[in-house]
Image (cartoon, rainbow, N blue to C red):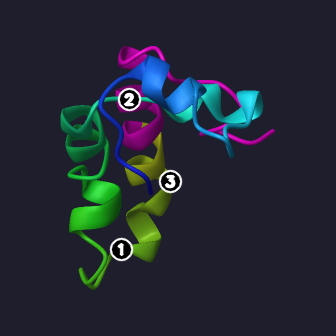
């Protein structure tokens, strides 16, 4: 992951790929996405049994942020 000052800074980066435009979110957004149960509960004994539920919450969080496209949720 690369951290940039702004979205414009990312788009001016020499290795920028427009396909990854949906991945541009603030650090606070990444913290919100990766603090959900999909990541926090990985060592829980019932993790695999609840994986679908956790993935649904992950997707819902992304969609709430306006990031529910193919970059995050492959078809």
Task: Report the magenta residues as a range.
Answer: 57-75
Q: CA distance from mark 3 to mark 2?
A: 25 Å
Element type at marker 3? Answer: helix
For the N terminus, the quadrant is: bottom left
In this view, the residue in front, 56 or 40, is: 40
Q: Position of residue 4 (x, y in %)?
A: 36, 38
Whether residues under marks 1 and 2 lie with C-beta atoms below 8 angstroms apart, the answer is no
Q: Which residue matches tag 3?
A: 52
In the rendered structure, the answer to whether residue 60 lies left or right of residue 16 reads: left
Residue 65 is drawn in which quadrant? top left
- Of circles 1 and 2, the one toward us is 2
- Of circles 3 and 2, the one toward us is 2
For residue 38: magenta? no
Depicted 68 relative to depicted 4: above or below: above
Q: Which residue matches tag 1?
A: 47
Q: Which residue matches tag 2?
A: 25
In this view, the residue in front, 5 or 58, is: 5
Element type at marker 1? Answer: loop
Q: CA distance from mark 1 to mark 2?
A: 27 Å
């Amino acid at each position: 992951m690369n951290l940039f000052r702004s979205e414009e800074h990312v788009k001016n980066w020499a290795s920028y790929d427009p396909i990854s435009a949906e991945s541009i979110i603030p650090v606070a957004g990444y913290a919100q996405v990766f603090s959900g149960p999909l990541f926090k509960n990985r060592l829980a004994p019932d993790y695999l049994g609840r994986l679908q539920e956790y993935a649904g919450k992950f997707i819902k969080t992304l969609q709430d942020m306006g990031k529910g496209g193919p970059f995050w949720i492959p078809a």
